[in-house]
Image (spheres, rainbow, N blue to C red):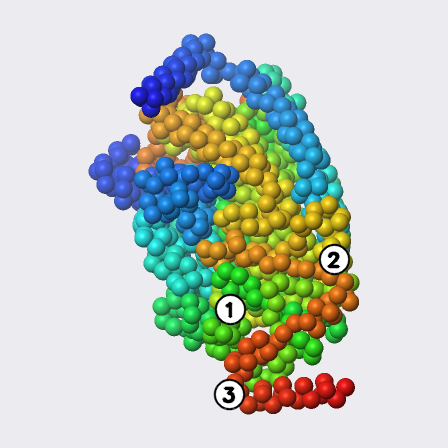
Amino acid sequence: MYGFLIGVGVLLLLSVIWMVYRIQTLVSVVKGSDKKLETTSNKVNAFLFIVFLVGTGVLMTWYSIKEFDNYQMPVASEHGVITDELFWITMAVTGVVFLITHILLFVFPYKYQYKEGRKASFYPDNHKLEIIWTAVPGVVLAGLVISGWLAWSDITAPAPEKAHVVEIMGYQFAWEVRYPGKDNVLGDYDYRLINASNSHGIDFTDKNATDDFPSPKVVIPKGEPVLFKIRARDVLHSVFAPHMRLKMDAVPGMPTRFWFIPTKTTAEMRAELKDPEFEYEIACTEICGRGHFSMRKIIEVVEPAEYQKWMAEQKSFVQQNPAIAQGQKVEVKEIAGIEKSERNK
Amino acid sequence: MATATVAQQDSAIYEHHEQEHHEHEHHDNFITKYIFTTDHKMIAKQFLITGMFWAIIGGFLSTLFRLQLGFPDMNLEFLRPLLGGWIDEAGKLDPTFYLALVTMHGTIMVFFVLTAGLSGTFSNFLIPLQIGARDMASGFMNLLSYWFFFLSGVIMFISLFLKTGPAGGGWVVYPPLSALEQAIPGSGMGMTLWLISMTFFIASSLLGGINYVTTVINLRTKGMSFSRLPLTIWAFFLTAVIGILSFPVLFAAALLLVFDRSFGTSFYLSDIYVAGEALPNTGGSPVLYQHLFWFLGHPEVYIVLLPALGITSEVIATNSRKPIFGYKAMVVSLLGITVLSFIVWAHHMFVSGMNPFLGSIFMFLTLIIAVPSAVKVFNYLATLWRGNLIFTPGMLFSIGLVSFFISGGLTGVFLGNSAIDIQLHDTYFVVAHFHLVMGSASFFGLMAGVYHWFPKMFGRMMDAKLGYIHFWLTFVGVYMVFFPMHYIGIAGFPRRYYSWTNYEFTNMYTDLNMFVSVAAFITFAAQAIFLFNFFYSMYRGRKATLNPWSSNTLEWTTPLHPGHGNWPGEIPTVYRWPYDYSKPGAAEDFIPQTVPLSQTPESNLPHEQEQVKLELEIMKEEAELLVANGSKH
């Protein structure tokens, strides 16, 4: 019954709109206003541009200020401070252009709306003007590009040798983290070695692999360079650590990397944001299938001393699961070697 | 070249035929007139109607995923009759199908609506009419072009109804995801159909493009030099050139993907362990696909945008009653964009893992392309300045386009800067950017074109008031949909996310997303006004006058319902550029291109006065030739 009544209502409404539409068409035919150019509609449209300019201008300004703390994400890496600065410089430059061009674009229609008897200016070109507005954007853009290029070169330069290495491997639909252990060198891997007990495909015949250890989260020291070695096991993924201003695709068959220096520990950020629950997060930003939206990993930034302590507490793959090393002679020998050398210290 | 010559002969024969039997139309039956037609005007209408069909589908798909994004907790049980198993027991949209929706929305909008619907419609309709040609160089190729497009559409449409769903790897269909059925069900049959469909689409677009280029080069009427071409034609011409050079590369990319999918090659695949199994492929590179894809993908942006800019140039000049400001600068910037569009593709790949040095190079090249784009905006503004503006719906949509072009273009300055792009890449900032600059701007160009040339297409006027309502609802609506996405993007929200509640940093803005969704629904619904106006006016609209906008270009010299061949009798000769609006001294505020300079001594500029003599000589020679030809019969 309800549906029927709503249907009747909608039908009535439509027929009213239809009648109004027909009547206004016929009236305009009778009045001959469809042949006029300086019409009420023309004036209304011209005026609406001003309304739009003011209305959206106020809305944009109000929302941009009100929400600033919400969309402006806190930054926690050294290069992030620089790219944020570039972002806001670009915002200022483009913001000015945005405002000026839009004011002109919407004021001109109002100012120069059709008037009977007035003639538009025949103004086909002005070389001086055109050269100016080719050169000025050229110079401004050059400035922006060069500053961007300098920052980009620094960010993508090879990582310092002492950088702490963390391997992040993406797969459907999670990340796995591997640390190189004391030697700071990751052991070899081969995707053909992947099985239920060796999800990374680590090659345990490589002695560098013996002290590699897994971690449920990414733990990194504050103030020291960290190098993410990124790879993917099945399809493309992308490591996105928004607070670190870090993003790099994970590509099967082609390891990638990104290094940075975190500047605030998780605890410091919690205090700053007054949010005891705060965590640095990693998300996936390259479409990878059904669970693309759920590849969360936590980064914990700690003081360097705490980091060293945490490192020492971790158990290597081999220690956690001696079975995976069994039958691999080279590797067994190496463990013995390391244990011996540690005892000798 | 051969086809062009044949076509010229054809049109010569046609002309001859027309002169002998004045207005003697040969009668087409329904099939040759409406279905397998070779008349460029009918083919244009076929492209337009098909494009509108796809726009409705593409827009509708976006309302489905906006429902998920704006109202994540809503029970979508009411969609079950339509989506069946894609709504799970709890009444939630299936996350895999969400990805399929996003993928299909992108594919449909980019290729079927904004490439075929825009370029296919207006290149076909306007090139012969505005350069003074009887038809395209090859009517048959033109016919094939449409029917390949149609076939491609049928195949894509079928893929929507597969049990495993259509392709779901994003419209860019990056491998390995798009190559491995184990990774996502859409990469099975859905992806196969996607590839077949795109193959036909590429063939269609090449057939069309070759035709456009040939026609513009060879079939211009007497006096229609390149420097007298309307900017629409310049835009369509360069668009076709871009398409011819870039679409084959997409075909190559697709072909290699087909090999990887079906024949066990390893162009894009390497070191993959998926679904509990290590695949034998080694040595391939997914980044190779990205390079090939974006070698088309970026020029594609301009394939979509340039025709819209061309249409806008024409509509703004006509309705400002002013010559377009800086005609030469407009042409040079179009040329500049054409060339540069080929060497900026890797700015889509700054964080793809390619060598960062390449990133630096592409950053420089990318920001160069911003200069001609800026010049175009300034020239539009200068054209409006001190004009006498008539706000036809076409004019309103053109002004809207300029606004989107500015808003979306400026955010490109952020994204083209690789250092800033690290954070913004694949976030909603990118979504906002390209939906404004490429999606909405081109869509507004399409709308401006339809409103402006509807009288020429159907001999009737569209209702202006409904046009105004349509414009304001859509213009405000588009900004309400895409402007908030900038905030969401700066906050780091990634694209193609089914839900944002898994992360702390994105677990906010539910209200803003709801707002965006509601705005999207309203904007989509507002298009019904246009559809009504379009189809109603086609049959019941007011009869148009021959030149309703008092425009200078050649198409308005044809009869109200031009037959196949466009002009009864001879094709008019062109004596001037198309932008003589409000010329000082002239009685009217427009002088059509067919009016000789010698007839308008009162308004000629000094250098034009010198051309008058030459023009008179040519006209005399021609008259003699005509007399000589006439006496032969």
- Type of amino acid under label 1: Arg
Of labels 3 and 2, earlier in sequence is 2
Vertical comparison of A210 with B336: above or below: below
Q: Is residue A87 visible?
A: no
Marker disc for residue A233: 1
Q: Residues within 10 Å of mark 1 (few under 14, many from 20)?
A: many
Q: Residue at x 26, y 34 (%)?
A: B25
Chain of the residue under the numbered disc 2 shown in the image? A
Vertical comparison of A12 with B265: above or below: above
Q: Residue B568 location in percent, x, y?
A: 34, 33
Q: CA distance from mark 3 to mark 2?
A: 42 Å
Quarter of image, res B572: top left
Nearer the observer: mark 3 or 2; the answer is 3
Vertical comparison of B52 with A14: above or below: below
Q: CA distance from mark 2 to mark 1?
A: 30 Å
The residue lying toward the viewer, choosing from B464 and B112, is B112
* Residue behind mark 3: A327
Q: Residue B117 location in percent, x, y?
A: 42, 42
The residue lying toward the viewer, choosing from A282 and B561, is A282
* Residue behind mark 2: A265
Q: Residue at x 66, y 43 (%)?
A: A71
- Type of amino acid under label 3: Gly
- Direction from residue A148 to residue B91 in the image, left or right: left
Of labels 3 and 1, earlier in sequence is 1
Q: CA distance from mark 3 to mark 1?
A: 25 Å
Chain of the residue under the numbered disc 3 shown in the image? A
